[in-house]
Amino acid sequence: MEQGFKADDITLHSLFLGNPGTGKTTVARLLGNILYHKGITKTNSFVETSRSDLVAGYVGQTAIKTKAILQSALGGILFIDEAYTLYQGDNDSFGQEAIDTILKFMEDYRKDIVIIFAGYTKEMNDFLQSNSGLRSRIPFTFTFEDYTMDELVQIGLLDLHKKEYVVDEALYKRYLSDAYTSQNDDSNGRFVRNFNEKMILNLSVRVSKNPNVDISQILEEDFPNAELHSVGNCPYCHDEIVVKHRKDGGLYYVHKMKKDCNFKLYEHMKRYKDNQDDIYVGENEAKALLRNESIKATLESKNGTMFRALVRVKESPKGYCDFEIVDFLNE
């Protein structure tokens, strides 16, 4: 165009496929801005819609509603979220009416509107099979991959830093990873947003009880999947010992760290699936350890052999709080 050649009209209707929270709506908005500033679309309008906006409950009303939405997006972008919900089987005459109206409009005004159909990959493929005219009118497909765990952590931390909150980044990564994987959730950035909102709400509740604390500092107890209460103090270093109640119902005992105090298992052993800083047991076991009683624990030797043993807390020669094996169990 800049060199004097006449540009052919291009149909830019697209499919955005992927799980929720992968940025489909955000990218659609950015695409709308780019197309407008490049002179490809006439307006910078972006209309987001879904089945509830397009489908009516009475015969003959759906076409009217759908056409009104389509006309409102003329010259710009129409983003149909969860587009696969428009087709809900052969008996869904209302949804089919909306689809037929959209198809005709796409053909009649293909130079004047860009329609983006968004939704889950599998459901959207089924949706395309419901009408042969759909796929032929949508030339572009973009697949939005799930974020990696590191990327989700970065998204969450950027959100918190933007709002000027201070948080231990390693602790944030541990709790977010645990929450995301334990709930088998595929909502990506949406999950992170909800996680942060719950955490900030917990912070607000804590601050309301003690207005003298730092309102920007997020503590471990503010994480949605970590509720703490004290059960006593270490018999050797006197540091506080707490039990965490997780949302999945699990309990584990944690000896909170001091610079000169490090809870470890017996020298060449470690608790199964545990790091070597904390000992994870239930509340009753925690109280037993505080009384200097032995508890049953699953251990793993250096060569990977798993076994059960009675262990108890002891003071190490270096001043640390360690564990010693009292007896081996045949379990």
Image (tube, rainbow, N blue to C red):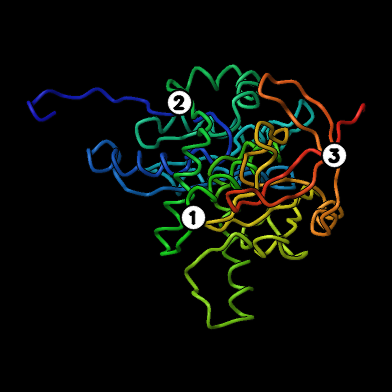
SS of the residue under disc 3: strand
Amino acid under disc 1: Asp
Q: How many marks?
A: 3
Direction from residue 266 to residue 326 in the image, left or right: right
- Label 2 belongs to which residue? 142
Q: CA distance from mark 3 to mark 2?
A: 57 Å
Amino acid at pointer 3: Leu
**Residue receiving disc 3:** 310
Which of the numbered marks, if any, corresponds to residue 168?
A: 1
Label 1: which secondary element: loop
Residue placed at 50% from the left, 34% from the top? 147
Mark 2 Cα-neighbour bin, 10 Å: few <14, some 14–19, many ≥20: few
Say what amino acid the circle numbered 2 marks.
Phe
| Left or right for 62, reference 232 | left
- Label 3 and label 1: CA atoms lie apart by 35 Å
Asked whether the residues under the numbered discs 3 and 1 touch, taking CB atoms below 8 Å apart as contact, a structural biologist would say: no
